[in-house]
Image (cartoon, rainbow, N blue to C red):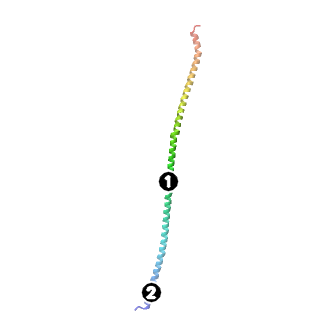
Amino acid sequence: MVSNDDILRALGRLEGKVDALDDRLDRFETEFSSERRSSSESRNRIYERIEEQAHRIGEAEKTVVVSGAITAQQRDIITGLTDVMEKEIKPTLKEWNRLKTLGWGMRMVLIGAGIGIGTFGTAFLWFGENIGPALRRWLPP
């Protein structure tokens, strides 16, 4: 038969094993809670980074949309300036070049007329001075 001492020893060993198991469970619980805490912090950092990336992508999309609108606006302005150039400035420049060419032509005509009148005047004076004595020589006295 089993004596009380044997029972008490078995109960002591059982109590020791239960205490060791309790200590082990406490360590596991502490480790598990720290792991849960660190994994929760890690997930929070991941979510923050995902939200930051989403915000950056949204800002980049806004920038692309604004850049596209600015490019379209510049294209419209360039088209308008091209139309103004074709319809208003080029005809004015053509007219100005025509007037400039006409001015050069008139200048040449006036220079030619001046040279012609000067030559005619010089010839008239020369003939005027020389024709009198020549006629007197030809005509009998």
Relative side of 121 to 33, left or right: right
Residue at 53 percent across and 31 percent down: it is 102
Say which residue label 1 marks: 65
Return the residue found at the far top: 141
Relative side of 128 to 2, left or right: right
Say which residue label 2 marks: 11
Indicate the position of residue 129 as horizontal and vertical percent values. Answer: 59, 16
* Marks 2 and 1 close (CB-CB < 8 Å): no
Residue at 47 percent across and 80 percent down: it is 22
- Bin the neighbour count of mark 2 within 10 Å (Cα to Cα): few under 14, some 14-19, many 20 and up: few
Residue at 54 percent across and 26 percent down: it is 109
As displayed, is residue 23 above or below residue 74?
A: below
CA gap between label 2 and label 1 equals 79 Å
Residue 1 falls in which quadrant of the image? bottom left
As displayed, is residue 86 above or below residue 57?
A: above
Indicate the position of residue 82 as horizontal and vertical percent values. Answer: 50, 42
Amino acid at pointer 2: Leu
Indicate the position of residue 112 as horizontal and vertical percent values. Answer: 55, 25
Work out whether residue 53 or residue 14 is closer to the camera in this orientation and state it.
53
**N-term-proximal mark, 2 vs 1:** 2
Amino acid at pointer 1: Val
Residue at 48 percent across and 67 percent down: it is 43
Q: Secondary structure at mark 2?
A: helix
Q: Secondary structure at mark 1?
A: helix
Work out whether residue 125 or residue 71 is closer to the camera in this orientation and state it.
71
- Bin the neighbour count of mark 1 within 10 Å (Cα to Cα): few under 14, some 14-19, many 20 and up: few
Residue 106 falls in which quadrant of the image? top right
Q: Which mark is residue 31?
A: none
Q: Nearer the viewer, mark 2 or mark 1?
A: 1
